[in-house]
Image: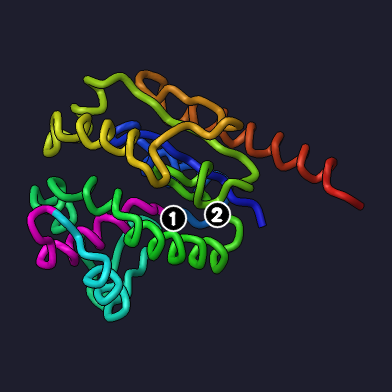
Amino acid sequence: MAIVAIDGPGGSGKSTIASRLAERLAVPMLSTGLFFRVAAWGLAPVLSEDRLEPGSVEDWFDHHRITVKGDRALLDDGYLGEELRLPMVQQILSLVAADSTVRRRILELERAQISSLGSCVVEGRDIGSVVWPEAICKFYLVARQQIRIERRPEEGLELIDRDRKDSVRRDAPLRMARDAFLVDNSDEPIEVLVERMARLVALQSERASVEAPS
């Protein structure tokens, strides 16, 4: 099973690159940030003074089902789309993502879904470092701040603030895995980047097959 991990801050183009790379490699793509957006949407009513009670979180996960199919998300049997980009969700996303109970429950979902997909391209914020550290090839996408904001005008500077909060959280902070390739997605055409990344995946896969015990 060959997993390709793509991590990076918001607005770096992870979803677009992951989708194109998955198409290039002829494998499924999974956007894990949707797990947290759905959780933020669902848990908003149980926030108490900007805090999440562990019991409330466990109860919510016990009674609801989050499913992510590529870049689409379902809560129970209903698709969620624009709701996941509402200011209400943006404002509490870092708080929800930093909650240890939320992270534990979503980590279980992420690993189960990756296992069910088999070979795939997975994008998020801690895929290469926490979710699937044994990924065959890891990338960390970056882009200039102004470009990232222009890509997410509905979030603006909140995007940068969320990245800062995610970088210093205790559990699974946003960071580049030690063995990841750094990719600047500021200026180069997507097609060029995807082709370069596909070649690196092929090289890493070949190296892994050579190093695998016979």
Left or right, residue 133 beside residue 176 = right
- Using the image as rendered, state which of residue 193 and residue 181 is in the foreground: 181
Residue beneath disc 1 = 30
Q: Amino acid at mark 2?
A: Cys
Q: Amino acid at mark 1?
A: Leu
Image location (x, y in percent) of residue 113: 48, 65
Disc sitting over residue 120 in the figure:
2
In the rendered image, residue 46 lying in the magenta stretch gets the answer yes
Asked if residue 146 is positioned above or below residue 54 in the image, the reply reads above
Image location (x, y in percent) of residue 183: 48, 25
Q: Which residues are magenta?
A: 31-50
Q: Is residue 69 visible?
A: no
Q: Is residue 113 visible?
A: yes
Query: How far is mark 2 from mark 1, CA to CA?
Result: 7 Å
Left or right, residue 44 beside residue 174 = left
**Residue at the image point whose x is 67% and y is 57% from the top:** 1
